[in-house]
Amino acid sequence: MKTVKKYLKIVLFCAGMLITSGRAAAQGMPVYDNVNFISFAKQLLEAGKQTSNIIKTMKFLKQQKENIEKVSKAVEQLKTVRNMIRNNERLYNMVRNDLRSILNSPYIRADEVERVSQSFNRIIENSMNDLEMINELLSSGHLKLSDADRMKAIAEREARSREMVVEIERKTQRYLDIIAFRELQDRINDRETNY
């Protein structure tokens, strides 16, 4: 009998379970696909590496842009200085050649020789001072100028050198005109009259 009771209890327990199982809801563990999780983690790591590389590339490009701007400014300064040097070479050549022909002319009086020489010498001295100032601007660290201020000063000096070239050309032409006028006046005064 004991065994029958035991079996009866087991059967009733199983029947109760079957009856209540229709209403009961089982809560199970969620199932993850490990392959998808691992590939997602790999994708995140790869995206992080790419982002890091992009940031490094952006820093590198920004630095190269700054370097190009510095080089561009330096090239612009060098072009301006080169133009200034060319203007000064023209000044020296004009003074050397034209001044010699003016001073050697018999139509320039002795008192004019000193004035002509002084006017040309002042222009040459100004050009030498400008070159020294440019040299100091470009090489000296004691002048704490920004690149824009330095470029502005160099451009001003270059404009002055162009003005000096124009002034030398104008003075040379004026003295050559004076010589031509005096030569013409001398021809007129020395001509033979046939009347």
Image (cartoon, rainbow, N blue to C red):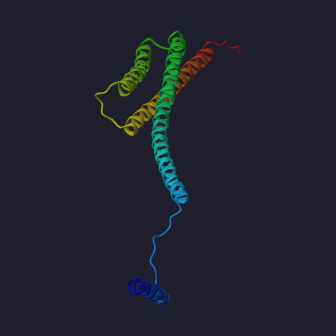
| Residue situated furthest front in the rendering | 1
| 188 relative to 35, above or below | above
- What count of labels does the image hold? 0
| Residue situated furthest left in the rendering | 142
Instruction: Please provide percent x and percent y for residue 138.
Output: 39, 27
In the visual, does 52 lie left or right of 176? left
Instruction: Please provide percent x and percent y for residue 172.
Output: 52, 22
Q: Residue at x 30, y 30 (%)?
A: 143
Q: Residue at x 49, y 44 (%)?
A: 53
Instruction: Please provide percent x and percent y for residue 164.
Output: 46, 27
Q: Quadrant of the C terminus?
A: top right
Depth check: give the residue in front, 153 or 111: 153
Q: Residue at x 48, y 28 (%)?
A: 78
| 137 relative to 120, above or below | below
Depth check: give the residue in front, 171 or 135: 135
Depth check: give the residue in front, 179 or 129: 129
The quadrant holding residue 155 is top left
Q: Quadrant of the N terminus?
A: bottom left
| 101 relative to 129, above or below | above
Q: Residue at x 38, y 84 (%)?
A: 2
Instruction: Please provide percent x and percent y for residue 51.
Output: 48, 50
